[in-house]
Image (spheres, rainbow, N blue to C red):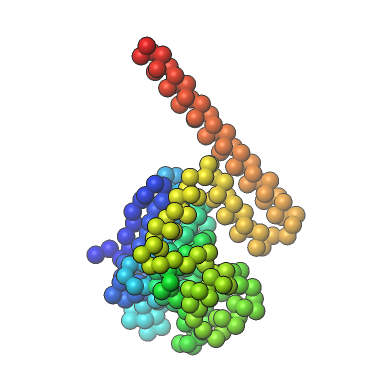
Amino acid sequence: MPVLLTKRHDGVLVATLNRPDRLNALNSELVDALAAAWDEARDPEVRAVVLTGAGRGFCAGADLRQAPDGRPRPGGLRGSYNPVMLAMAALEKPVLAAVNGPAAGAGLALALAADIRVASTGARFVPAFVRIGVVPDNGGSWFAVRALGYSAAFEWLASGREFSAAEALQRGLVCDVVEPDDLLEATMARARALAAMPGRAVGLTKLLLNAALANNLAQQLEAEADYQALAVADSGRNLARAAMASNLARKADSDAR
């Protein structure tokens, strides 16, 4: 059985972590499948991505049965997790996480890497790293400090304390909490709305906001000017294609008469 299921709906690629017997814990095969999913998501026909988990968990983190330190092989973090997280962050598409259950350790980092998170009432957010004597990885430190600010992120990650879905909502880690049966559709509704936006504006906005975390004002103004040029050029091409299609339709109608 595939460890990652992908399916497209209305321009939205749904990627489902599919190791429910292990709470979708990450092993080498699943890490490779995620890398392939981000490659698939670069298809222009894909306008948004929804990431979720099969069964009762989102992702329990690294599969500790795979190796003594729990890290996929070969290459350790640099050869496994890191390229996948960089590809996810660089994707010019919105990524929405439908967090259906526990998101722990590296699985928590995977959820935090999404642009939007929607949680079921049964979701739990567990920074389990310190509990086993290791530091956050999979980008967890980078995403947590940007989501919460330094002090709140440090208190959370250094204590290993889990957040319920309600507390995650209160702290702004998720944008909504819904009943488990409503989770996927609620997340898909947001994804479809983003996918329906014209041109490249949504994807470029994602990249622009990511750049803002490192840029000073002058650098960000330059980035805005560059991305605006890309957005306008793409809108112009779309308008030209629409006008051509309209002209062809009118000609076909005229010929039919």
Residue 165: x and y, percent?
48, 73
Determine if residue 228 is in view: yes
Residue 46, relative to residue 76: is it above or below?
above
Residue 54, relative to residue 251: is it above or below?
below
* Image quarter hosting the N terminus: bottom left
- For the point 36% across and 77% down, the residue is 63
Residue 30: x and y, percent?
35, 67
- For the point 56% across and 81% down, the residue is 156
* Image quarter hosting the C terminus: top left
Q: With 51 as the anchor, is 146 left or right in this view?
A: right
Outermost residue toward the left in this view: 1
- For the point 39% across and 18% down, the residue is 252
Q: Classify residue 220 by image quadrant.
A: bottom right
Residue 230: x and y, percent?
60, 42
Determine if residue 139 is in view: no
Q: Classify residue 18 by image quadrant.
A: bottom left
Outermost residue toward the right in this view: 218
- For the point 59% across and 42% down, the residue is 231
Of 184 and 6, nearer the camera is 184
Residue 67, relative to residue 79: is it above or below?
below
Of 90 and 170, nearer the camera is 170
Residue 226: x and y, percent?
65, 46
